[in-house]
Image (tube, rainbow, N blue to C red):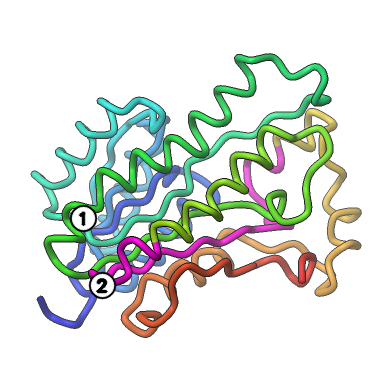
Amino acid sequence: MSSSTTGRVAVVTGGASGMGEASCHELGRRGHKVAVLDLNGEAAQRVAEELRTDGITALAVGVDVSDHAAVAEAFAKVRTELGPVHVLVTSAGIVGWAPSVELTPQAWQRVIDVNLTGTFFCAQAALPDMIDAGWGRIVMISSSSAQRGSPGMAHYAASKGALISLTKSFAREYGPIGITVNNIPPSGIETPMQHQGQAAGNLPPNEQMAASIPLGHLGTGEDIAAAVGFLCSEEAGFITGQTLGVNGGSVM
């Protein structure tokens, strides 16, 4: 296979909004064909249409990443329409707030199912193509909650902490084949999910959040996408098993 990333197929889960959407555009700009996977199929279609308007080959697939059969079907569709998958960015995730003593089994399980198990299912579906090619890039979007803990979000922090461990395990297992696996734990990034948390009273306003960030302002989805693009590039070929914080200095 050519050393250029041009024309390789990149799958982005949670690609219809926020950091995932920005990553779709960044990977497309870098020459990838982009599969936009999201629970919201209509929103995924919107992003794919925007990519195609920019001259990027793109496909939208609606999928619940916690559904193993649905994930397998989605990746089969990507292979059929775009080709084998060599880049995977797992941005699909959900959040929840509740005191730990009040967390229901259902609330705990749903967050684990989407954030952790869903990421595993998608990586498991993409890896055979990467193994066949002897080349691959996986970037998991974790969270600074995994690094410093989050009161009232034990299930979320636990699910994202597990992604850091999953990153390291996959990196050791598949590094000899030529596949790199890294994760990005964002913090202080303005996203639709953040706005929902603020509207519900679970997160402070932007000004208060920015005051706790050494750089003095919130980040954007494009800040995360820039790091995603680099980690998926040829230039990042000697970086694997790493946690790259994109957080304005809020976690050091």
Q: Residue at x 28, y 36 (%)?
A: 61
Q: Residues within 10 Å of mark 1 (few under 14, many from 20)?
A: many
Tell us which disc is closer to us: 1 or 2: 2
Q: Residues within 10 Å of mark 2 (few under 14, many from 20)?
A: some
Task: Specify start and end residues of the magenta stretch as a single range.
Answer: 171-195
Q: Which mark is residue 178?
A: 2
239 with respect to 78 (left or right) = right
Number of callouts? 2
Verify CB contact (< 8 Å) between mark 1 and mark 2.
no
Q: Which mark is residue 209?
A: none
Compared to residue 10, the image places residue 35 above or below, namely: above
Q: In the image, is residue 175 part of the stretch drawn in magenta?
A: yes
> Which quarter of the image is occupied by the C terminus?
bottom right
Q: Residue at x 20, y 81 (%)?
A: 4
Label 2 element class: loop
State the residue in front, 156 or 54: 156
129 with respect to 144 (left or right) = left
Tell me residue 103's x, y (percent). 74, 19
Q: Residue at x 56, y 55 (%)?
A: 164
Q: In the image, is residue 176 part of the stretch drawn in magenta?
A: yes
Residue bearing mark 1: 85
Residue 240: image quadrant is: bottom left
Label 1 element class: strand
Q: Amino acid at mark 1?
A: Val
Tell me residue 106's x, y (percent). 60, 14
Q: Residue at x 28, y 58 (%)?
A: 10
152 with respect to 69 (left or right) = right
CA–CA distance in space, label 1 to label 2: 14 Å
Tell me residue 221's x, y (percent). 57, 59
State the residue in front, 55 or 133: 133
